[in-house]
Amino acid sequence: MQASGDSYVKKKYAPILPGSMDWPVVQLSKNRKQFIESVIHESVSVITALHAENGSLKEEIEQTRFKEMLRVKQNPWNVDPDDDPAFWSGIKARLLKISVGNNEKKHEDEIKNILHEIVSRYAHEIQGNFKRSRYKLARTLVKFGFKRLLNASKVKGWRSVWSRRVTLQDKIQITGEVEQLRNLAKKGTVIMVPTHFSNLDSILIGWVIHILGLPPFIYGAGLNLFNIGILAYFMNSLGAYKVDRRKKNQIYRETLKTYSKLATVKGCHGLFFPGGTRSRSGKIESKLKLGLLGSAMEAQRHSLQHNSDEENHKVFVVPVVINYHFVVEAPGLINDYLQSKGQERYYVENDSFTNSYKILIFLFKFITKGSDISVSIGRGLDLLGNYVDEAGNSIDKKGRRINIRDYFISNGEITEDLQREKEYTRRLGEVIVKEFRRNNRVFSSHLVAFTAFNILKKRHSHLDLYDLLRIPKEESIISYEEFRKSFELALQQIHLLNQEQKVTIAPHLRDTPDKIIDHGLYNVGMYHSKRPLVKNKEGNLITHDLNTLFYYHNRLCGYGLENIV
Amino acid sequence: MDSKISSEKPVGVIGAGSFGTAIANILAEKSKVLLYARNEAVVNRIKNEGISSGQKLHKNISGTNELQEIATKCDILFPIVPSSAFRSLIKDLSAYLHPYHLLIHGTKGMDVSTPAEMDNVTKLNRDQVKTMSEIIQDESVVVRVGCLAGPNLARELADLQPAATVVASHFDEVIEAGIRLLRNDRFQVYGSKDLIGVELCGVLKNIIAIASGALSGLGYGENARALLISRGMVEMIYLGRALGGNTEAFIGLAGVGDLVATCSSTLSRNFSVGYRLAQGEKLPQIVESMEETAEGINTIKIAKKLANFYKVRTPILDMLHKVLFEALTVEEALQYLMKYPFNVDIDFL
């Protein structure tokens, strides 16, 4: 049951649903008009209800209008529709008219109309653009591209691009509860929640989903990614809907949540990154954004309310941990982190994935030079954070079956209690964070970075983080002997944690310490222009970039290793 | 407030000690109540004579000896048993519990997951020590849990004197159920979201209650007690925050309210432990002769180890620990405390 086995999954899986016409996501896109209408309808009634008591709906719209006009002016993106300014000016004018006249009934209707228009605009923007034919093409492209490029890495040179010696699965290792995931996807609706470190994650997960024979998952991808042609193409094709993080107003948020909730109710498997954005620090997410988990919770209750058989209407949460030796955006991410630590300030997306060309270059480098990636599929959970068995039954700590309907019952019947569901969602978030830690897979590169940074931290214990990151190069030299001693201690502890099933390890960590160190040094942040950790001529360790060393070190924070090294 | 009996399922009370019985009587004013006692003789007295723990029982209360029966008939349960028996009770009960159950406990103690080894360690961290609500979630599938805490001396409740309590839970639903079931013309119910904080109030005040008894045992008056209560509360807050509670809970009804009541009442078990210590009796004798558990004794043991781990400054607790387990006399402890260099009165608000 545990994801601690070393062996990698490497086989071809048959699709769990034979014909693609049966995919819920295809059904959804076939009936997209109808679906979007139901999203609009429900969102409008939810938002109206939220403001029914104090009559603040007009105020809310006014505020939204103001924020949106500000956004249009200050932070426009390529993907924004051209009529954005015109639309919001139109809303403004109509709102003004309402305040001067005095026919109340008419005004209420007009406010409702305006709300309906805004929600409808948002819903259409959010809606994904899934097309079966394009999905197949994109999938083939990804597969073909990755595979060809991979081969180039083994037999150096462009010509080898066409040989067939290495498969993608040699490079991207899928481990963990794969069979269970396939079962659960047949039984109910799966919500996959991966850790988020790189923009590559979405494409990677899309590929994993396909390899495992699962129908496409829909997911909310940051609208900023649609700015970039090549990513937009893949995203649209793989079933993405759009999430615009600039729109921080209630109307937008409710529409988004309703969209996700109704898709879940319809049985579409979903995927979202609960960390919200990529981890800036390189640490595994410990605080999650609960909004979309909350809509999954509502979807689960909704399904139970309207269906008596729990078995076929269950929502499952599957945590997934992605591990890299190398995160292309690391220098930028850690900079963001260091700059904004301690303050919730607005920041402008600024990363290395700015255009299609750069991405292609990266993919090429990444694949030709051979940096391993692992994708660990965690054990399935129900929405209350209980483990589920192979058949999807919820199981308590003592191995007894739980009927999840009971969680939503009050006085003998299912009730809608949003505060209760909010609390359940908070608890679920805590369980997911624990599962992330447990399913995290330690790579040699993480461990060398962790050890080296900790030695420096101890050596300069009087310095705070920011001063430590500024120490001169000559003070950051670590003798190999010293390093090896600490590394061995850390390695022992990792093996211990692994036995206790508190973390998983990559197979290469079973090698001898010297070999693991070499492997780690070769791989850690391997394509950064300034390497985080290398051996100098004397065989001692030096760093060219303490910030990224700190970044890769952070991956192993929270396991109590600090006291060992 | 209407006093008619609703046709809903009965409410369950588990544990027929003095506080459990008093709560059962309050609940019985509005609902049918099923009162569980482990001891068959006690159940027979409930059934035949209508008496439990020396209190006359309301006619709406019936007794049972079966955990399965109480869990099956009731959706809402109030477990009120000594903390030392709490985990095993929930373990036994858990086979019959479902996620639709609501549990509101009234037990004021802490649980150590490895009690056998407890005497050999000097430090305990928060993961090793559980509150009662955490035990419920550890051992059963119930998540909708809450607790009762406040100045609720069982004797006074039984005499129908006016009083109030706090129901704490993360769930509005649980707080509302507590208010609906318990509230009456002489019993006021407040709600709180700080479950851990309110639980810790009930737990930690027992430490100070023992000290208060000791002051009385030495023959001192109200100045000394007021000093103890206010400094004791500061210690509770330091420790409580280190263990995951918020300051607010401690300055509310369950915190300072309960502290004042427990420290002023000679009725309290913990108070009498301190009183008798000051009179020169030894701890084993005192424990031997008591009918019900004085939670404060075990709490001092655990709290001291927690304070060691989290490096919390707790002079009163330290001295009590020495008196109880290291043969310091009450007079010596008091002398030490009066020389202790406190400078700042309040530094946590």
Image (cartoon, coloured by chain):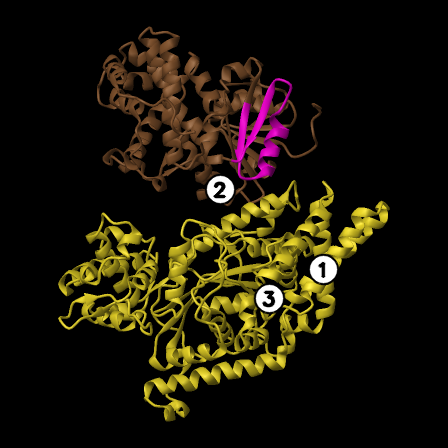
Chain colours: A yellow, B brown
Residue B94: assigned label: 2
Distance from label 1 to label 3 (Cα)?
24 Å
Task: Quarter of the image for the C terminus of chain B: give it.
Answer: top left
Is any atom of residue B66 visible in this view? no
Instruction: Tell me whether circle 2 and circle 3 mark residues in contact (CB < 8 Å).
Output: no
Q: Which amino acid does label 1 sit on?
A: Ser
List the residue tagged with mark 1: A89
Q: Does the magenta stretch include residue A277?
A: no
Q: Residues within 10 Å of mark 2 (few under 14, many from 20)?
A: some
Residue denoted by label 3:
A242
Vertical order, A42 against A352 (above or below): above
Height in image: A305 above or below B260? below
The disc placed on residue A98 is none
Amino acid found under the numbered disc labelled 2? Ser
Image quadrant in which you'd find residue A18: bottom right
Q: In the displayed structure, does residue A97 sit left or right of residue A46? A: right
Residue extending furthest bottom?
A159
Amino acid type shown at disc 3: Lys
Q: How far, Cα to Cα, is label 2 from label 3?
A: 45 Å
Secondary structure beneath label 3: strand
Residue B249 seen in the figure: yes
| Residue B243 pos. (x, y %) | 38, 36
**SS category of the residue bearing label 2:** helix
| Image mark 1: chain | A
Q: Answer above or below: position of A80 versus A458.
A: below
Q: How many angstroms separate mark 1 from mark 2 (CA)?
A: 61 Å
Q: Residue A534 location, x and y as percent?
A: 23, 70
Q: Quadrant of residue A254?
A: bottom right
Q: Which residue is drawn at 53% across and 39% down?
A: B170
> Residues in magenta?
B165-193
